[in-house]
Amino acid sequence: MPLQSEQLLNLVTKYNVPGPRYTSYPTAVQFTEQFDSDVLNSFHKNRVRERRELSLYIHIPFCFSLCWFCGCTKVITKDQGRGDVYLDYLEKEMELVYQTIHPDSVFKQIHFGGGTPTFLTPDQLQRLGMIIHDQFQVHDSVEFSVEIDPRRVGEEHIIALKEIGCNRASLGVQDTNEEVQKAVHRIQPFEQTEKVSGLLRKHGITNINIDLIYGLPKQTPGLFKKTISDVMQLDPDRFAIYSYAHLPSIMPAQRLLNEADMPTTGEKLNMLVHAIQTLPEYDYQYIGMDHFAKENDELSLALKDGSLQRNFQGYSTHAELEMIGLGMSAISQGDALYTQNEKDLNAYYQMLDGGRLPIKKVLSLSDEDHLRRELIMQIMCKRKLDYGQFFDGDRSRFDEHFSEELSRLKEFEMDGFVEITDTGFNITDLGKLFLRNIAMVFDEYLKQKLHQTAYSKTV
Ligand code: SF4
C-alpha cells in the first residue's frame, strides 16, 4: 500500500465526505419520535417470553469539566450529589426494564460509558453494582468494561470497580502533549494516566484500552508520534484512535476550538498512517476504522475467525447479544427494533416518575433494513462480501436488487479499494482506510441524501 504517496492524499481528498460510522444500520439519525407505541409494546412482549443473552450499557452523563472537542451527551457539574439522584432513577428504570425481559435472561456484557462513569464516587459505584446484581442475572464470566477519565479516578474507585466485577478499562487520553491539552481544555499530565494504568493492573483490571484522537488543534504529526510512543509504555491491549469530528453546528462546544490551529487533511492522514504503520511493529493488528488490538486479543482473534461484529460501542466480539441501554440518551439495540432514551435529564426523570420507560425515539427495522444491515456489517467486519449469502443464493435477484450499487463499486475497483471476483468482492489493504465509503454505497438512506450533514467526515 503506497501509504505516503501523493496519490493517497488525492484519494483521501476525493473520499473525505460526511458519512456514518456504522455502529448500527440504520444509523441513529433515522430514529424517530413519531413511533407506534403498539410496535414497542409488542417488541417488549416478545422479549419477555424468551430467555436471552444480553449486553447492558449504562450511560453516566456527568463530567466535572467540558472538553471542547467532545461530542458525547453529557451534563457538566461538580455536584457529586447528583450521582445519587441519577442512581435512584437508574434503579427505577431497571425495575421497568426487568418487566420486559425473561427472568432467566442473562447479561454477558456490561459497559459503563459517559460522560464520565468515574464521576460517581466509589460508594456510588458500589451501589450501582449492587443494583445491577440485585435486579439482573449476570453471567459468571461477564465482560465488564468501564470508561475511565484518568483525571478523575483514585485507588478507591478502582477497588470499587473491581469489587463490582469490572475486568476491562478504557482510558481516555486523546493526546499527551500539554499544548494540545490546553487547546482542547483537558489538562491531563501523562504521569496521571500512567499512575491510573498501574493501579488498574495492581487491582487485577488488566485488560486496558487507550483512546486517542487525531486532528485536534495544535496537533502535528511529530507530536502525535510522541503521544503514541508515550502510551505504548502502558502496554494496552487495544487502542481506539479516532479521527476528530469537527461538527460545531451540532456540537456547540466545538466552537471554542481555534480552527486555525487544526491540522490539515494531509497532516491528519500522516498521523493515521503513522499509527497504521507503527502499531503492527508492536504486535497490534488493525481491526478496522479506528481500532487496533494485540494479536492475541479477542478482537484480533474474532477478526481472524470471522466472528467480529459491530454495535453502538464500536467493534465487539459480543455484538450478537441484544443490547439494553439504560440512562439518559442510552440506545438499546434489538434485532428488529432500536430505541433511544430521552436526552434531556429532567425529561428522563419525569418519564420515570410517571412510571414509564424513558424511551424517546424508536426505529423498527424493515426487511430491506435487515438485508442492508447484514451486508454493511460484512463490509465493516469481514472486509469482503459474498453475494451468494443473500436472497438464498439467487445471484440474479441480488444483481437486480443492487444493480446501481454494483455499478458504483467499479469506481472503488479503479481506485484499488476492492477486488471484484465472480462471487463478490474483497476489500484491499488500501480499501481498509475507506471502509465507511464502501459501506455507504449500500446505505439506502444516504441515497435519499437524508441527514448526511449530521455525520463526520469519513477520513
Ligand atoms: S470528553 Fe469525556 S470527560 Fe470530556 S466532556 Fe466529553 S464525556 Fe466529559
Image (spheres, helix red, strand yellow):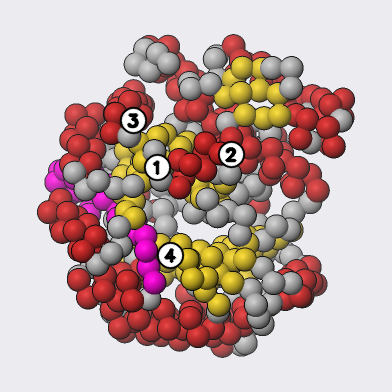
26 lies left or right of 266: right
Label 1: which secondary element: loop
Q: Earlier in the sequence, mark 4 or mark 3?
A: 4
Label 4: which secondary element: strand
Q: Residue at x 69, y 72 (%)?
A: 51
Measured Cα–Cα span from mark 3 to mark 2: 20 Å
Give the class, few, some or many, for how many residues have Cα within 10 Å of label 1's Cα (few <14, many ≥20): few
Tell which of 62 and 309 is nearer to you.
Answer: 309
In the rendered image, is residue 208 in sight?
A: yes
x and y, in percent, of residue 448 in the image: 71, 38
Q: Amino acid at mark 1?
A: Asn
**Residue under pointer 1:** 296
The disc placed on residue 306 is 2
Given contact means CB atoms under 8 Å apart, are the residues at marks 3 and 2 in contact?
no
Q: Amino acid at mark 2?
A: Gly
The disc placed on residue 410 is none
Q: Is residue 386 above or below residue 381?
A: above
Measured Cα–Cα span from mark 1 to mark 4: 19 Å
Measured Cα–Cα span from mark 1 to mark 3: 13 Å
Tell which of 35 and 256 is nearer to you.
Answer: 35
Q: Earlier in the sequence, mark 3 or mark 2?
A: 3
Q: Amino acid at mark 4?
A: Phe
67 lies left or right of 428: left
Measured Cα–Cα span from mark 1 to mark 2: 15 Å
Locate the N terminus and report the quarter of the image it occupies: top left
x and y, in percent, of residue 78 in the image: 26, 75
Q: Quadrant of residue 389 in the image?
A: top right
Q: Amino acid at mark 3?
A: Pro
Locate the C terminus and report the quarter of the image it occupies: top left
Residues shaded magenta = 165-189
The disc placed on residue 144 is 4
